[in-house]
Image (spheres, grey):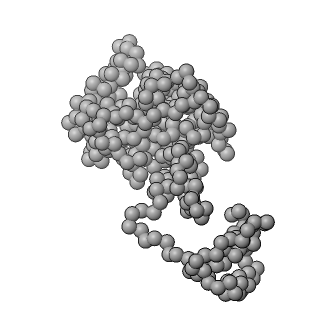
Amino acid sequence: MMFPMPMPEMPQEIMDAVSADPGAFAAALGDGMDAFQGAMADGGDMGAAFEAMGDVMGPIMQDMGVSPEAFDAAGDAIGAAVGGGMHMGPADAGGAEMGAMIQDAASMMMPEGMDVPAPVMDAMGDMGQGFADAGCAPHDMAGEMMPPPGDPGFPLPCDASGDCIVPAGDPAACPADACQPPPMDGACADMGGAMMPPEGGYEHAPMPADATMPPPMDYPADVAMAPPAEGYSDPAANMDPAAVGPADGSAAPMAPADDAGGMGALGDALGGPPAGDPAPAPMDAADAAIGAAMDGAMDQGGAPAPADAGAAPAEDASAAIADDDQGQPDPSAGMG
């Protein structure tokens, strides 16, 4: 299975409530789950059951300092994250598997360096079993939790007609830049089997030419969102001009490669050195002359590299090259 990429952000007010009293937050999830199951038992559909869940949890969250706007934004974000994962998960996933999806989605939405507290993680696992006990199948859950395809907030790519291009239960049909696997040390990994990608990953389908990615979720202006979660990997990062290099053709610093499955946090690397960091030390004259001479030698048939205004005299550069070229690998190899 896979999760959407990037994952929606979680409102800061939710993060504050979780940090302030994890036990109370977990209890609120349990009360909401009881309301959901009660509505289903009374013959309601999933839409009505989720409304009952919100009616119970909303006032509790407000007492914990979460505004109605932030609570609604959290519902939208969790619905997109969990719903997107359940959509790409196995159709026969049971309560334990659905609980693992909820747990991993929550972990991936947390700000970098912040873990889901154990009481809340346990309550989320219980929610998955509660959904199964209420007779909810994962793909039906996904359809109820996400907005319709083509609407803002729908977490998966759609074609020009607004239809989702990823069939339910087929994570390989999701283009690689629109989805990411569960954490390698997360709850889905503990489940094993179809809950994790096969060894070597899926052979993802290419993004169709007419496909559209969902826009960022539109949250109310007065709802503060948490920092990007660990695991966020911006599909547009490779389009950053800084990654191409300076206009003078000199080499640009390379951003660290994302780890397997795109789970690394690349924000700091792609943004360059943090403010206040010392600038790299300039090359001395001998190094500049050596680099220019070797580049010219590797340029077959081309004109010699222009002299550097600050370079050492040519005879000094030649001597430096001779001294340096004693079985050492050519530092310019593969850079042409």
Q: Within the image, what quadrant is residue 28 found in? A: top left
Q: Of 248 and 219, which appears nearest the observer?
A: 248
Q: Answer above or below: position of 124 versus 228.
A: above
Work out which quarter of the rendered image holds the C terminus and state it.
bottom right
Q: Position of residue 248 (x, y in %)?
A: 58, 62
Q: Residue at x 46, y 56 (%)?
A: 271
Q: Residue at x 36, y 31 (%)?
A: 75
Q: Answer above or below: position of 178 versus 135.
A: below
Q: Residue at x 32, y 25 (%)?
A: 53
Work out which quarter of the rendered image holds the N terminus and state it.
top right
Q: Within the image, what quadrant is residue 27 found in? A: top left
Q: Of 210 and 189, which appears nearest the observer?
A: 210
Q: Residue pushed farthest left?
A: 63
Can the viewer see residue 66 in this picture?
A: yes
Q: Of 186 and 243, which appears nearest the observer?
A: 243
Q: Position of residue 300 (x, y in %)?
A: 78, 66
Q: Position of residue 49 (x, y in %)?
A: 36, 20
Q: Residue pushed farthest right?
A: 301
Q: Position of residue 332 (x, y in %)?
A: 69, 69
Q: Answer above or below: position of 235 versus 138.
A: below
Asked if residue 61 lies left or right of residue 74, the reply is left
Can the viewer see residue 291 in this picture?
A: no
Q: Within the image, what quadrant is residue 194 found in? A: top right
- Tally the marks: 0
Q: Residue at x 75, y 82 (%)?
A: 326
Asked if residue 147 lies left or right of residue 33, the reply is right
